[in-house]
Image (cartoon, rainbow, N blue to C red):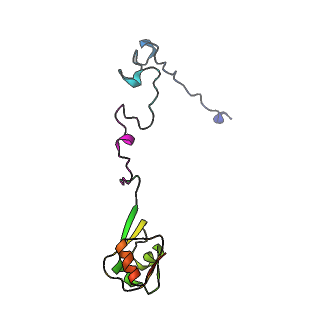
């Protein structure tokens, strides 16, 4: 019974700051240091991103369209494919983003935002180009000359 009673814990009195030198803490600075914004009465911490009056990072970095340092075009790529690379397909195949991935012309991990076919080399097959793929003017002539079509 007596062994279940809790022993009385001694509790020190809290130091009363800002009540003069005899109160046991500080005096006129009362643990706030000397001068400065944090030592003043009514101080609240500034908003997130505040850099003490200097131009904040969010306003220093460029915000132009196409700026690609981890903000707007992060991880997105433009892929250019040459006509000579399309000769691996069979006659009458539909060329789309999926078929290019299966053929190994696009990596499986890349996030291709735009795919463009350029007129480098000769096309020996007649192919059907999907509407999601852009084609240069000279490549369009070469595809049509090889009896290919554009959707």
Q: Nearer the viewer, residue 99 or 18?
A: 99
x 54%, y 25%: residue:
11
Indicate whether 35 appears above or below 107.
Answer: above
x 40%, y 35%: residue:
50
Q: Can residue 89 be seen in the rendering of this structure?
A: yes
Q: Which residues are magenta?
A: 49-68
Q: Is residue 78 magenta?
A: no
Indicate whether 89 appears above or below 135.
Answer: below
Give the number of marks. 0
Residue 103, quarter of the rendered image: bottom left
Could you say where residue 71 lies in the image, as x and y percent from the top left? 40, 52
Q: Is residue 54 magenta?
A: yes
Q: Quadrant of the N terminus?
A: top right
x 39%, y 52%: residue:
65
Residue 49, quarter of the rendered image: top left
- As drawn, the residue found furthest toward the left would be 121
Could you say where residue 93 lies in the image, as x and y percent from the top left? 47, 83
- As drawn, the residue found furthest toward the right would be 1
Could you say where residue 85 lies in the image, as x and y percent from the top left? 35, 79
x 34%, y 74%: residue:
138
Indicate whether 72 appears above or below 23.
Answer: below
Could you say where residue 15 lies in the image, as x and y percent from the top left? 48, 20
Residue 43, quarter of the rendered image: top left
Q: Nearer the viewer, residue 28 or 69?
A: 69
Magenta stretch: dominant secondary structure: loop
Indicate whether 37 appears above or below 101.
Answer: above
């Amino acid at each position: 019974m007596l062994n279940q009673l809790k022993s009385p814990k001694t509790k020190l009195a809290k130091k009363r700051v800002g009540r003069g030198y005899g109160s046991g803490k500080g005096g006129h600075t009362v643990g706030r240091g000397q001068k400065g914004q944090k030592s003043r009465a009514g101080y609240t911490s500034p908003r997130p991103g505040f850099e003490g009056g200097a131009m904040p990072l969010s306003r220093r970095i460029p915000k132009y369209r196409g700026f690609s340092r981890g903000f707007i075009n992060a991880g997105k790529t433009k892929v250019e494919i040459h006509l000579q690379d399309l000769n691996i397909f069979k006659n009458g195949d539909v060329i789309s983003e999926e078929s290019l991935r299966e053929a190994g012309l696009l990596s499986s991990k890349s996030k291709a935002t735009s795919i463009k076919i350029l007129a480098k080399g000769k096309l020996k097959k007649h192919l059907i180009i999907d509407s999601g793929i852009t084609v240069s003017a000279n490549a369009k002539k070469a595809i049509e000359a090889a009896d290919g079509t554009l959707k």
